[in-house]
Image (cartoon, rainbow, N blue to C red):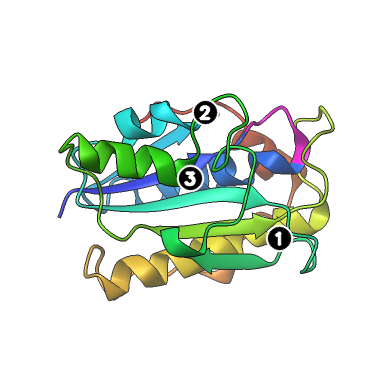
Amino acid sequence: MKTLVLGMGNTLLNDDAIGIIVVRYLQSRLGNLCNIDFKETSWGGFRIIDLMRGYDYAIIIDSIKTGQTESGFIHHLKTSDLLPTLRLNSYHDINFITAIKLAEALNEKMPEDPDIFAVEVINNFTIKESLSPAIKNSIFECSKKIVETLKNKNLIEDKFELKLSDKIETEDELSSLYVEMESV
């Protein structure tokens, strides 16, 4: 099954970077162990069609600001559950659902029933290449949930585990994830 793990966000806007940071974290741990493509984007709307075209399944990671849960809470959503986020619902372009529906209407092959992991944030507007402590802690927790989802779909070996020793502890470890990686 052709699979995409797509991180959305902006690494210059504090906690809005979480989607991209989680994808980079997962790529560094899973990249050589599986046949999964890891991509990242700061854009939504029509560009989503180009990024997701041709995949059978996708996991999308982004920040979300509902104000209903604590910072760092990880929402596991389906497209039917979507709440507005900066890129999943765009003011200058079409929103995520509309892009998916448009692609389907154009007979584009798009992932069926993607899983969306949205990390609750408070600060997604301050220009700062760093994450707040609660969001930094969610890198590991969100990644564990994604690994479990991939295992449940038989996309990675059942024996693969993220260990507590894999958790990002220092600012240097976090800073290393801000260095752009090549998308597979």
Residue where numbered disc 1 is placed: 137
Looking at this view, is 101 or 74 the one in front? 101
Frontmost residue, 32 versus 76: 76
How busy is the neighbourhood of tag 2: few (under 14 within 10 Å), some, or many (20 plus)?
Answer: some
* Residue marked by disc 3: 23
Q: Is residue 121 left or right of residue 164?
A: right
Quadrant where the C terminus lies? top left
Q: Residue at x 82, y 44 (%)?
A: 123
Residue 116 at x, y percent in the picture:
47, 58
Q: Nearer the viewer, mark 3 or mark 2?
A: 2
Say which residue appears at 62% left-offset and 66% top-offset: 74
Q: Magenta stretch: give its range.
A: 10-14
Residue 175 on image: x %, y %: 68, 35
Q: Position of residue 29 (x, y in %)?
A: 42, 51
Query: Tag 3 or tag 1, which sits nearer the N-term?
Result: 3
Point out the tag, 3 or 2, that comes first from the N-terminus. 3
Q: Residue at x 31, y 37 (%)?
A: 102
Q: Residues within 10 Å of mark 3 (few under 14, many from 20)?
A: many
